[in-house]
Image (spheres, rainbow, N blue to C red):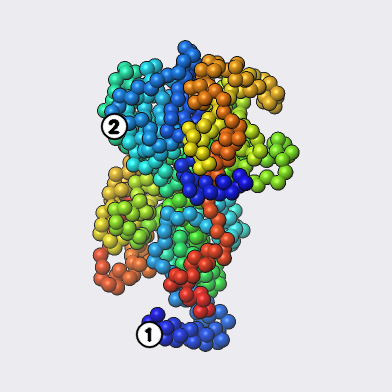
Amino acid sequence: MLTSSTNWLEKVKTRRNKEEIMGENPTHNKKTGLPRKRFYRARAHSNPLSDSHFPIPISPDEVDYSLHYPEVVKVDPSKKIEFADVGCGFGGLLIALAPLFPDNLMIGMELRDKVTEYVKERILGLRTTNPGQYQNISVVRTNSMKYIPNYFGKGQLKKMFFLFPDPHFKEKNHRRRVISPFLLDEYAYVLAVGGIIYTITDVEELGEWMKSCLEEHPMFEALTTEELEADQVVKLLTAATEEGQKVARNGGQTFRAVFRRIATH
Amino acid sequence: MEETNMDDCEHNRESEVAPALIAVHPTQKSVAVAVGSNLRVFNLQEGCSVSLVDDSGVHMHKDSIRAIRYGAEGKLFVSAGDDKLVKIWVTDSWQCISSVSSEKRVTAVAISNDGRFVSFADKFGVIYAVEIEGSHENQSLPNKKAVPILAHYCSIITSLECSPDGRYIISADRDFKIRVSVFPEKPSDGAHEIQSFCLGHSEFVSCLAFICSKDSQQWYLLSGGGDSTVRLWDFTCGSLVDTCHVGETGLLQSKEGIDDRLLAVTGLCATPGGSLIAVVPIPGETFIPTSLAAASSSNQLWMVMGASSLCTSDSAPLARVKVLDGFCESNQDSVEQEARVLEDKDLPGSEQLLQTLQGSSFIEKDALSAAAAAVKTAMCNLLIKKQYPSENREFRKRGRNDKRVDKKK
């Protein structure tokens, strides 16, 4: 091992130890009660093809809403999730959407367990510091490419988000992309007619791919420019997400494809 | 001692043990058995074995056949398997009219009810369709390319069926799912519209069958799975109508200490009379069918037990054929008593049939039970998700950078 890295680790270690002695819950910011990202660092990618070792609801009826939305369930136990942020990352979009759509339940789906853990803590922190708010958002660790139908019934969703997904450049790995002609069948199944699918990326090649997949699918049509401008959510795709902010900081370009689920025939 | 043998099999030739398969012509004109790469067909009308004619210009099956099936009208027959070839035969002359090549190993095949399309599923969960034109003339077709129509995300498709009303194509997978897709008018455009998902199994789904209710004339879907249940579905809306836990039927109570995991339902067959037959391999039984088939016109159930190849012996592929006769339309509970296994001499075609389908008229019992055990182990290894104890998983992750933070805490 390189000595410099060992030294660095030692430094981090002593700093962490100090913090642990000082604070009760060092992984959270003492003032805001929110989790601190550096304690939830994870790899940027996760293998979507591997067998999953986390619990998965057998059917949408088995999704435990009281666990995700305890306050909402108390008022209206029949409410269903209507927005899904697939690959929600650190949850920036969910948190921006929560006050805009207080009557819609939303869920973030993320494959990396540490990131999911962070979002969970973040939402819990926000709920504590803002009583009555952020009750309509939650997060679940899952592989949405495999288990979307286990979470949502036919036509249940109104909006689906695929923001800055893994680009998977190699042609061999294109089947790992979260937007693909075959997976769109499943998204079309869980989306209600009129429901909207939002995709955005900073990788031009992937942007082209997602757009062409959606264009070629018989159950989706593109939103018009006017519709895009009228939709308040579209602006959030870049402004609210951590990845979007990063791209903006670096002055990068983004490629967007927003499509509506249409009825067949 | 058998246990250790089985373990060896697991490591060496796990994927190479293929169960023997059986299929019966809808009006019982012929019966086909596939063992390993051998396809054996017996003409029941004339009581003679059928010699297959392959004009497609491609070789016969070179590796284990994993799926065989007759079309609903009996004019077509399809065989496919590990050699990535889907062979389409016409049953009046037993000519192979087309050999379609697949990119991956084929795990299941289906023929649309109108006989216009053959669908097959590969090991990565993609389902393809091939159009058959002029299948009624005995002409060879150009060897066509199949178009992918739908996919389960990287999951082995265990069973593929076209619904009896011809409207849906139903696929079951290793990830507990049954997907009901609207069969497209033009399969080249893909089967994008999903009618429903039948979700309820808590382990892999191994087999599908259809059953018609006598009162309402409505078709229902049956599924068997690794969770030792047989489930009844209203497949147009995906709702679970009934569940039968095999362990609770009373038949297994005499056997103690059986591991639940071993009680996977491996075969299903519904007879026209409305009876349901499910196969659950129980250790110690002498005859465990690896495949079932019934003609739509008779009350006989055809069963085969066998395996393609065994690590213990290098002999020819083994298969044992039996016929269960006499399903009555009366009540379901008494099926056990009324149906009986035909003696070898009473079989239609008797000695000759066994010669053709089994490869020999007499087969040792021991070899067969070893074969059945190997098949079952191979299937479970393939389909059951391996569960690592949490310590092992932590150990596997230890080398990863993102876990170091945890260790320092």
Judged from the image, the secondary structure of the residue bearing numbered disc 1 is helix
Query: Picture coordinates of residue B305 (x, y %)?
Result: 55, 31
Same chain assignment for discs 1 and 2: no
Residue highlighted by disc 2: B144
Task: Choose between B126 and B98: the one closer to the eye.
Answer: B98
Point 59% across, 53% down: residue = A77
On the image, the x and y values in percent for residue B172 come to 49, 40
Label 2 residue SS: loop
Marks 1 & 2, CB-CB < 8 Å contact: no
Q: How many callouts does the rendering have?
A: 2
Above or below, B408 against B313 in this view is below
Please name whichever residue, A72 or B173, is drawn nearer the observer in this view of the structure.
B173
| B40, B256: nearer the viewer | B40
Rendered view: B88 above or below B172? above
- Vertical arrangement, residue B30 with respect to residue B372, above or below: above
Residue type for callout 2: Lys
Mark seen at residue A144: none
* Mark number displayed over residue A4: 1
Residue A124 figure quarter:
bottom right
Q: Is residue A39 visible?
A: no
Q: Chain of mark 1?
A: A
